Amino acid sequence: MRVQERNTTLLAERQWKNLYKDIKRDKQEVVKRLQDLQVQVNVMEHQVEETMVICEERVNKERMFLLELEERHQAAMTRARDYMVEQEKDVVH
């Protein structure tokens, strides 16, 4: 009976050691995968930041262009109004 108990104990001990090794290996694989994923996330964040900077630059250029067009439009409207006032003065005189 003692021999059977000892064999059972040794078998259980081996199974626990194997299970521990498997869990340790799985944990190392998960940690490695998480590290790889973190690197990918960092790369993607950098790409998004670069894209945002490019978009902001484009939006700012468009905004400046629109402001310039608005200024030109206002100047043209002022000239047209002034011209119309002068024409009305000429017609009246």
Image (tube, helix red, strand yellow):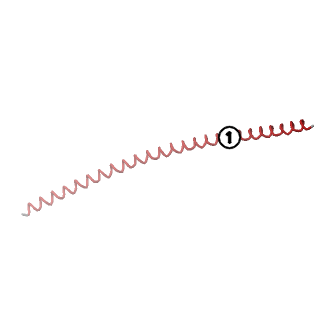
In this picture, is 2 found above or below 77?
Answer: below
- Residue at horizontal 77%, vertical 39%? 77
- Nearer the observer, 90 or 39: 90
Q: Is residue 92 above or below residue 12?
A: above
Q: In the visual, does 88 lie left or right of 40?
A: right
Q: Residue sitting at 29 percent across and 53 percent down?
A: 24
Q: Is residue 34 left or right of residue 4?
A: right
Judged from this view, the residue extending furthest toward the front is: 92
Whole-percent x, y for residue 70 in the image: 71, 41
Q: What is the three-letter code of the residue carrying label 1?
A: Leu
Picture coordinates of residue 43, whole percent (x, y): 47, 44
Res 74 → quadrant: top right
Most foreground residue, 93 or 51: 93
Residue displayed at 45% across by 47% down? 41
On screen, residue 6 above or below 21: below
The N terminus: image quadrant: bottom left
x and y percentages locating residue 92 in the rendered image:
91, 38
Q: What percent of the width, then of the height, locates residue 47?
A: 50, 42
Q: Does residue 66 appear to the left or right of 54 in the view shown?
A: right
For the C terminus, which image quadrant? top right
Residue ID for mark 1: 66
Q: Nearer the viewer, residue 81 or 38?
A: 81
Q: Residue at x 89, y 36 (%)?
A: 91
